[in-house]
Image: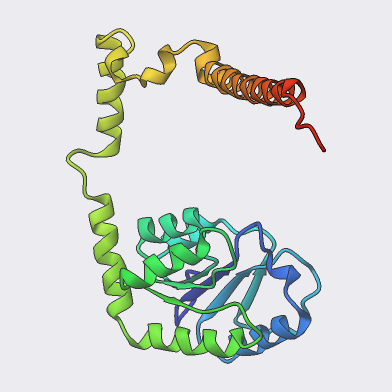
Amino acid sequence: MDSAEHGVIYFSLGTVFQSKDMPKLLKKNLINMFGELKQTVIWKYEGQDLKNLPKNLVILNWAPQSSILNHSNCLIFITHSGLLSTIEAMHFGVPVIGVPVSFDQILNAKNSVANGYSISVEMTYNLAQELKHAILEMLIDKRYALRIKELSQIYHDRPVPLNREVVYWVEHVVRTRGAVHLRSPALELFWYQKMYVDFLALAVAILLAFIFTVRRVIALACRKKKTSPKKKTR
């Protein structure tokens, strides 16, 4: 990354949906597209089946994501928009191109776009083409980088540095003999209350009472029908 003259683009889809599981055609198109860029591309790819790679494409089975995003030459983070990756992008101030797949990723991608530091691209067979358009737009339009730097500064802005804040709270817990006043009231509940056993018992009691009442009503109705006098027929 130190020798990347035109900067670095980091591409990772997380651990749940892995890049190696992509269709072969999609992977081939991505390799060709990355080869057309001037920037160095680091791709976290879990397999060993990629061949004939362009010189600017670096494949890593495991990538030190924090170190990569923290590097001054990291220009763009192409991510699946997972929560932790989104937080890391905010922490290190790297603009994002989101490729959400499932779960909370879609909402995270929408929020990132709404905050002005991200472009969202759908996971389709046209991913390579749409991804290239997003990369070129983000490289030309500096508003994405400026916006994420602004948000990152807000994210890091605290009354005191974290190391001092940690020391303060540790000392506060010691001074107050365990900081009981800050503990959740749930810690004081009995085990059967934490497990909702009392609520379950109440629900079962109500259900049994309802069943008993219905059976009694049905039994009384049947008994009354049997004891009622029959009409005489002529």
Horizontal side, residue 225 vs residue 35: left or right: right
- In this orientation, which residue lies closer to the viewer: 175 or 116? 116
Asked whether residue 128 appears in the rendered view, the answer is yes
Does 79 appear above or below 131? above
Residue drawn 31% across the image and 13% down it = 180
Left or right of 208 in this view: 79: left
Who's the residue at 77% across and 81% down the image?
24
State the residue lying farthest toward the left: 159
Q: Is residue 24 above or below residue 158?
A: below
On the image, the x and y values in percent for residue 89 come to 41, 61
Residue 117 seen by the camera: no
Query: Residue 62 sits in which quadrant?
Result: bottom right
Residue that appears at 54% across and 69% down: 100
Closer to us: 155 or 203: 203
Depth check: give the residue in front, 35 or 155.
Answer: 155
Q: Quadrant of the C terminus?
A: top right
Q: Position of residue 199 (x, y in %)?
A: 52, 21
